[in-house]
Amino acid sequence: MALTELAVKQASPKEKDYKMTDEKGMFLLIKKNGSKYWRLKYRNPHTKKEKVLALGVYPTVGLKQARLKRADAKELLSKGIDPGDHKKSTKSSQGDAAANSFGVITEEWFVKQQMSWAPATIKKHRALLNNDLIPYLESRPISELETWELLGVLNRIIDRGAIDSAHKCRQILNQICRYAKQTGRSKHNPASDLTGALPERKTTHRAAITDPSGFGKLLVDIDAYKGTHIIRTMLALAPLVFQRPGELASMEWSEIDFDGGCWNIPVAKKKERNKREGDHTVPLSKQAQELLSDIRPLTGHHQYVFPNQRDYKKHANTESINKALREMGYNTKEVHCFHGFRASARTMLDEQLGLRVEWIEHQLAHTVKDPLGRAYNRTKHLPQRIDMMQRWSDYLDNLKRQVLAGNVITASFVNEA
């Protein structure tokens, strides 16, 4: 049965390599690492020995292109020419230019890199490649690319106002060209001279309240929020644990250790660049445990602590918190957003409680290195971080009391010991 574009696109890797058959000897080989290769099975017209011809890598070579290549190979066979031998001689005469084209090198690089990327990163990089780079550079021998040529491609992106995308594409080009140089396909990296050639992108920080009086008022407003119990609890827990929105929204009951007083975030949920450091332990203060115990009768029989209200098999949407903040009167672009709880904690734990920066950075799940440049283990300073998280929750309770009393003291909580 002939393949379809949709079937090829949706083909996913399995534990072992496998084939999807098209027609007239052509098939798609899906490797266990996710890469897809077009192949043609045929017999040498003279020896009758069965051989396999490579037709390209998907998606650089689509289904229609692969079939055209199959037709070309069949035509050679009808003339008594072995398409595999013909391909080798053509490559030799062309100096392997096609094999070392930007498109081929890019796919090779992409297959190797995607094994360490998060699904969202794979999707973003593939979109940038397919929409902004491959259409203009695919057939160019990578060893012949010049800096001005790459800049022309990036300027097309700049012209439509997508400055951030242009910078991301510059980074991708640099990685691809550097890979070509490292693997002997090019003697220089033309993308390395693109630094400073693009307009600067505007640095935007996520909105966050970092002054005690404003944050205390936010906490009081959270306590008074009239939304659903699930969203209200997630909103109240956010400042106590200050983890990434996606990690909090997808919190599972199996990750909560009430006896140990901690939340263990599995490595699979962590931001890609922090995965090498393993699971992340978040000590839970008494206040945080009380919130979880309170909602447990409602959602404890489900997988997620904060299930989606339309489908309890899914977790809540992070945008629900931003929506709740907007309903409370907080502009999430200019005043405070869900992610802003991290910046609030980072600033006030340092400036108001005077706690050690490495403890705070550990708790934010940021990479922290020792004097020799090695990443600290996630369990390092755990006793101190347990104490820090309880002091933080107590400090937030005190902020609320002071707001309600109309008197916020901003700098009397530093531990001078």
Image (spheres, rainbow, N blue to C red):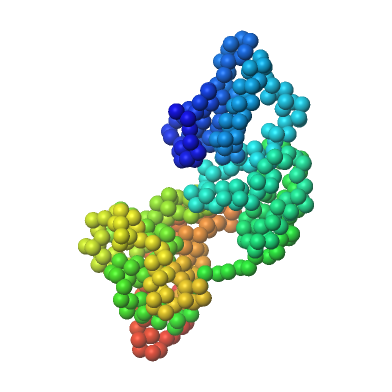
Is residue 410 depicted above or below 16 in this figure? below
The residue lying at 33 percent from left, 76 percent from top is: 225
Q: Is residue 348 left or right of residue 290?
A: right
Q: How many marks?
A: 0
Identified at 56% across, 48% down, the residue is: 126
Residue 29 seen in the figure? no
Q: Residue furthest left?
A: 297
Which residue of the protein is positioned furthest toward the top in this rendering? 47
| 53, above or below 219, in the image | above
- Say if 311 sits above or below 109 in the image: below
- Looking at the image, which residue is at 73% across and 39% down? 141
> Residue 154, position in %: x, y?
69, 55
Across and down, in percent, residue 70 comes to 59, 27
Relative depth, front residue between 44 and 15? 44
Quarter placement of the C terminus:
bottom left
Residue in view at x 26 percent, y 55 percent: 302
Tell me where residue 1 sits by quadrant.
top left
Residue 252 occupies quadrant: bottom left
Q: Which of 4/398 is in front? A: 4
The answer to whether residue 417 is seen in the rendering is yes
Instruction: State the image coordinates of residue 159 (x, y, percent, origin top left).
Output: 69, 61
Between 71 and 314, which is closer to the camera in this rendering? Answer: 71
Question: Where does residue 398 sit, x and y in percent of width and height?
Answer: 37, 80
Please identify the quarter of the rendering in which residue 216 is found.
Answer: bottom left
